[in-house]
């Protein structure tokens, strides 16, 4: 019974450690690696924030662009994806 309990506890600990590793790999290590590679090529961009990325900034820009009616024009890119348009003008 005691060995079964030890095996169960060690299995649970290894699952938790694996989940933590996957979490930090996906939400911290990969974005920082991409940022480092892009900056080594002198490609700038908006700063990364942990877990959410740039979603807060993107949602604010989308709400602002959707708050007023669209003009009758074929240039709808700044209306549909204002964050890309803004970053294109800022970062090139």
Image (spheres, rainbow, N blue to C red):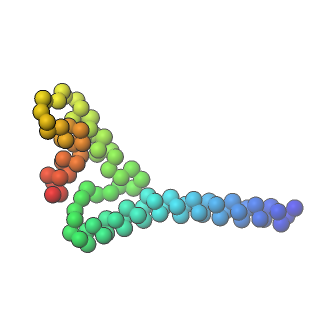
- Side of 48 where 41 appears, left or right: left
- Residue lying furthest top in this view? 69
Give percent across and percent down for residue 72: 12, 29
Asked whether 48 or 85 is in front, the reply is 85
Whether 69 is drawn above or below 74: the answer is above
Q: Residue sitting at 22 percent across and 29 percent down?
A: 67
Q: Quadrant of residue 58?
A: top left
Give percent across and percent down for residue 81: 24, 42
- Residue lying furthest bottom in this view? 40
- Give the total number of marks visible in the rendering: 0
- Residue lying furthest front in this view? 74
Q: Quadrant of residue 50?
A: bottom left
Asked whether 41 or 17 is in front, the reply is 41
Whether 11 is drawn above or below 56: the answer is below
Give percent across and percent down for residue 39: 25, 68
- Side of 72 where 54 appears, left or right: right
- Residue lying furthest right in this view? 1
Q: Residue sitting at 37 percent across and 61 percent down?
A: 31
Give percent across and percent down for residue 9: 73, 61
Tell me the quarter of the image containing the N terminus: bottom right
Tell me the quarter of the image containing the C terminus: bottom left
Q: Residue sitting at 18 percent across and 27 percent down?
A: 69
């Amino acid at each position: 019974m005691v060995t079964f309990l030890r095996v169960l506890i060690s299995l649970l600990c290894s699952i938790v450690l694996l989940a933590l590793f996957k979490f930090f790999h996906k939400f911290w290590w990969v974005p920082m690696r991409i940022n480092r590679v892009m900056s080594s090529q002198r490609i700038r961009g908006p700063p990364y924030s942990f877990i959410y990325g740039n979603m807060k900034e993107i949602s604010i820009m989308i709400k602002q662009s959707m708050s007023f009616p669209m003009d009758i024009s074929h240039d709808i890119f700044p209306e549909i994806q204002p964050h890309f348009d803004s970053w294109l003008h800022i970062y090139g």
